[in-house]
Amino acid sequence: MKIFLIGLPGSGKTTMGKSLADALRLPFADLDVEIEKSEGLTVPQIFEKRGEDYFRAAESELLKKFTSSSGHFVMAAGGGAPCFNRNVTAMNQSGITVFLDVPARAIASRLTKTNLKERPLLAGLNSEQLELKINGLRSQRIDFYGQARFTFSGEGINTAEVLAKIKG
């Protein structure tokens, strides 16, 4: 079983992914972390030194390796991963996609408590700008996120409900 968690930055993909992986006794992978390992640079460094287009190409190549592998895992895909290079199609063809649809205000609140410098598309924004940016990203990406097999909406999405739906 391959499970891909998709959604906006700060929607809880990594947290949910680790929890699901534990519950299902599967390995967990964070696509951004895998890219950093592969490239030898952090995501912000890749954006700064090589640009977003390079990052998206590297992201797609690595995702292809995961989608074509015979392994089972839970993956937190980067927020933009489903939106480029037919990645959402590849994820849907090889596994189960789960969209964590968390309100922009809740995401902005969560992200103000983190180091935004680690998130190139959000770095340097105040909380008001952050919420506007998240709403903008959601508008741009919703058609891709909407292709997920399962969608969970709200602030309190929990592992038990996600497990019940994907196992059902």
Image (tube, rainbow, N blue to C red):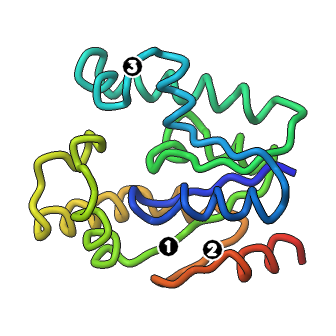
Secondary structure at numbered mark 1:
strand
**Residue placed at 68% from the left, 52% from the top?**
4
Q: Earlier in the sequence, mark 1 or mark 3?
A: 3
The residue carrying mark 2 is 151
Q: 41 or 62: which is nearer to us? A: 41
Q: Do the residues labelled 1 and 2 touch (CB within 8 Å)?
A: yes
The residue carrying mark 1 is 101
Question: Horizontal placement of 74 versus 40: left or right?
Answer: right
Q: 100 or 141: which is nearer to us? A: 100
Q: Earlier in the sequence, mark 1 or mark 2?
A: 1
Q: Relative to 34, does residue 11 appear above or below in the rendering?
A: below
Q: Relative to 120, does residue 112 appear above or below in the rendering?
A: below
**Residue placed at 50% from the left, 38% from the top?**
84
Query: Which one is in front in this view, the residue at disc 1 or the one at disc 3?
Result: 3
Q: How far apart are marks 1 and 3 (CA)?
A: 29 Å
Q: Relative to 53, does residue 136 appear above or below in the rendering?
A: below
